[in-house]
Image (spheres, rainbow, N blue to C red):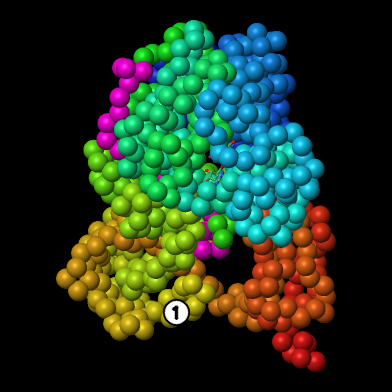
Amino acid sequence: MFKKILIANRGEIACRVMATAKKLGIKTVAVYSDADARAKHVAMADEAFRIGPAPVSESYLKADKIIEACKLSGAEAVHPGYGFLSENPDFVDALDRAGIAFIGPSASSIRAMGLKDAAKALMEKAGVPVVPGYHGENQDADFLKEQADRIGYPVLIKARAGGGGKGMRRVDDPKDFADALKGAQREGEASFGDGRVLIEKYLTKPRHIEIQVFGDSHGNAVHLFERDCSLQRRHQKVIEEAPAPGMPVEMRRAMGEAAVTAAKAIDYSGAGTIEFIADVSEGLRPDRFYFMEMNTRLQVEHPVTELITGEDLVEWQLRVASGETLPKRQEDLSFNGWAFEARLYAEDAPKGFLPAIGTLEHLALPEDSARVDSGVRSGDEITPYYDPMIAKVIVHGPTRQAALGKLLASLEATEVAGCVTNAGFLAALCRHEGFAAGDVDTGLIDRDLTQLIEEPSIPVDAIALAALTALGLTRPASGNDPFDTLAGWRIWSASRQYALLEIAGERRDVEVHALGHQRFAVQLEEGSREYALVKVEGGAITYDCDGHRARAVVVEDRKGLTVFLGGHAFPVALPDTLSADEEAGGAGDQLIAPMPGLVKVLNAKAGEAVTKDQPLVILEAMKMEHTLKAPRDGVIGEVLVAEGEQVTDGTVLLALAEEADAAA
Ligand code: ADP
Ligand code: ADP
Ligand code: MG
């Protein structure tokens, strides 16, 4: 076994790998960019090396810097995590030349599976069923169109080098084919430097079911059962589970065998995933699953497999890479219970899942009820440079229902302030009836999106507690000042106080009367209610109202307050009178970049009339395109940026003319 390894990654996966290394008594070396100098993965490692500035192309993708860090530290092997260099065969070759082991498959296995078209051809030859379509050499546009016509619509055009759901276009109507082809080629070229495509029959009721495989350098290969990753948005996984709901035993066997055949066909060593798509228009059937692609690395969702099998997949990776045989044979592997993983992201689901950035001013992850794999701590920043994942929340239960209940409870106990998250969306998914019944397919999220991103309106208790906090009435007693314990009930303080709050863009004036020790009457639009604070501990407030005892957490950050109540987070802004007046005049008159990015498309000229929600700017940030729309009807006054310009967040992109000017 290795004595010291280097982890060529960051965030949760770097921390995850180090946890197992520590367990096995292996020393760990981290690498970091300037943006990560104080990151959790650096703090966790025994030693760490700076490899460059924040952008990944200048740091985490710099193979030579990483190899240099191995030499300086004496690390014998590199764990690549996922993403970055994990599926780069040239990196594996370079390590090989330097005499450093790669904790992953051989360069030739990675090459064999690296391109979707070649991988499909290879699997077809090995007798593994593949999605019907065209995956040949000819890239002539007319020829590809003929192939699509032959396959029959809808079809899916895929960039052969694609990954992460990018470079794909669904085509329903033959007349849209040419444009879609150009789009897929453009995205493939831009993101992966390869514009070549393949065409597949688009399955209209598919489930994404993948098999975890493992091989060693002694010719053995096993599978560790399936994961269902059908809950997706824009072809990206949102919640994963294992086993797959409703999976017939004979289908599991057939898929497991096909996956092991695939692994053996390329002499696979290490952890890999064979992704299949199942046509479930007639339910799950052993003759209706097709090879989609192989990911030659550890998968983001590997923990669900760990929880049902009781195996540590990173430990398996380390053992196999150091030359040991697989820890278990196929017949010794089994699974029990059910596991789910939810990906907690800094993103704004109601705003089209716009990635968010910000400081995690308050972060309480559900470590008591779930396994939480995270690379950030309270006070850390989500930057625009990397994937905005905050944590993976992973649970296990004896049954699917029990595990899903645990996942919901864990998400409801998750508190993040300073940055919007998809926690509410994930919790809504857990409450979704179809999902709860195991009736999943890749279209579920899109079909019920409106319901899933609906934000609950703020409860009166949350408004009241926000008002009390804003007025400084919920501060715990210091114990020194006798008057402290009488917060809000000082003889010289006004018995009547007013808090000015802004909730969902609306002003709320809240009147508070101190009634006695930790007792207040709060006058709301909904009427007057009496609150007694039973216990205040940091931001956690236990209170009585109308004979009902409840608990909420109120956190203050730079932007205002966040109230966590009943499993939901409610942001409350605290406008001061001055900025309030300014804003009232200017609201909705500007289009502001919500994050740093590149102005990809600018569809606006000064003097042009626009209607509310008309798309004006496409901003590319974090490798995704975000459409920014007109905030209201009006006329464009001024355009302040140009296409191709890099902007920081908060940059005013354009301004609408004032109503009076526009009329003139
Ligand atoms: P999977 O679930 O199949 O492992 P994902 O859909 O999570 O893959 O990610 C798609 C691609 O983006 C993969 O190539 C993965 O390695 C990469 N990726 C995902 N998350 C991160 C991350 N936090 N950092 C770097 N790369 C990532
Ligand atoms: P990536 O490399 O981006 O992960 P995949 O080929 O694995 O690309 O496909 C990603 C997702 O796109 C799948 O999980 C599935 O939801 C959807 N998808 C892929 N191929 C098809 C298809 N032929 N029909 C319907 N959906 C598909
Ligand atoms: Mg995939």
The front one of 568 and 117 is 117
Magenta segment boundaries in residue numbering? 330-351
Q: Position of residue 557 (x, y in %)?
A: 49, 58
Q: Who's the residue at 58% across and 77% down the image?
A: 580
Q: Who's the residue at 52% across and 32% down the image?
A: 129
Three-letter amino acid code at the position of disc 1: Arg
Q: Is residue 339 magenta?
A: yes
The front one of 254 and 415 is 254
Q: Is residue 454 left or right of residue 185?
A: left
Indicate the quadrant where residue 115 lies.
top right
Q: Secondary structure at mark 1?
A: strand
The front one of 152 and 228 is 152
Q: Is residue 554 above or below residue 500?
A: above
Q: Position of residue 343 (x, y in %)?
A: 46, 45
Q: Who's the residue at 64% across and 73% down the image?
A: 613
Q: Is residue 250 left or right of residue 355?
A: left
Q: Quadrant of the C terminus?
A: bottom right
Q: Which residue is mark 1?
A: 508
